[in-house]
Image (spheres, rainbow, N blue to C red):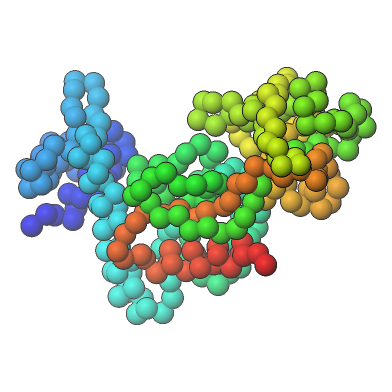
Amino acid sequence: MINVDDLRLFIRVSETGNISASARLINLTPASASAAIKRLERQLGSQLFARSTRSLRLTQAGEDFLRYCVQSTQLLDEGISNLKRGHEELSGEIHLGAPSDLGRDRLDEGLEPFRHKHPQIRVIMHLSDGIQDLYRNQIDLVLRYGLLRDSNLIAMKLCDNDRVVCASPDYLARAGKPESFESLGQHNCICFYRNGTIYNDWRITHQGKEKVVNVSGDRAADDGALVRKWVLQGHGIAYKSRLEIESDLEAGRLVDVFPSAQSEQLPLYVVYPDRKYQPSRLQALIQFLQQSFKTD
């Protein structure tokens, strides 16, 4: 029989990349922890870690096994918690990933009814504009824009969304409103980096024709919230998700520069691991997100 404590140790070591450090976290000696990992590998008949004198990293088998370990220990913890609490109310932790701008503004505020309804659930938010690895980072759910590529995950569409070429009234008064989409090349455009790649080819469809313009400017960032801050301050023009600047457009803090054009479509999805048994607290949050982002 595989020891559950060995599985928990395996998860710890995959996070830290260090057996000795993981052992100290759970009051084990390094020798005991090393023996437990070797015992688990022997029982599974697979090498979970590639070892060298200076590093420890997951093998492909370890990467594949990790997600099942995380799921099984989470379900076990929830089952124990429910038995102890007599199924009175949902409890436990949910690790929720989201784009930085969406998470800091709309999502954080929108989660308040869920927090109020389920006070024993602690939602831990992981905000990043990069692609978050749900298994390695032990994230339960993540909100993502665009289509899903990982077949090991499930994506549920929350709402439609598009990009908006936007600027502050101050910037447009000072620099003038672009006369055409192509003229964006003569403006200071605030660009966004994602996973080390700059997003500076902006696309719209106007009168049935797709147009692409390569833009540039004096600043760029891999954080969507910082890009939003700069455009609100009047430093230039940005190409932002409508969901992230909807309140700014309604309040007049930002202006849709090309309101009649069709911009890139960027639907919002909630993404989570494909597993047979979904913890009740995750089911509750998924249903809440569906209702929260539901549109007519």
Residue 31, position in %: x, y?
Answer: 13, 36
Left or right: 30 as drawn, with respect to 109: left
94 and 210: which one is in front? Answer: 210
Q: Is residue 218 above or below residue 30?
A: above
Q: Can you name the residue that lies furthest to the front here?
A: 208
As drawn, which residue projects farthest toward the right? Answer: 173
Q: Place residue 11 in its image quadrant.
A: top left
Residue 82 sits in quarter: bottom left
Estimate the x, y position of residue 23 in percent, counting from the top left.
23, 40
Q: Position of residue 124 (x, y in %)?
A: 49, 53
Q: Is residue 182 visible?
A: yes
Count of marks, rendered view: 0
Which residue corresponds to the image point at 83% horizontal and 42% vertical from the top-left? Answer: 255
Residue at image location 39% in from the left, 69% down from the top: 280
- Measured along the vertical axis of the image, is residue 251 above or below residue 220? below
Along the line of sight, the residue nearer the viewer: 226 or 286:
286
Q: Is residue 289 left or right of residue 211?
A: left
Residue 221 seen in the figure: no
Expressed as whole percent of the image width and height from the top left, the position of residue 36 reads 13, 43
Q: Nearer the viewer, residue 288 or 188?
A: 188
Image quadrant for the N terminus? bottom left
- What residue appears at the point 23 percent right and 21 percent down from the top-left corner? 54
Q: Residue at x 67, y 67 (%)?
A: 296
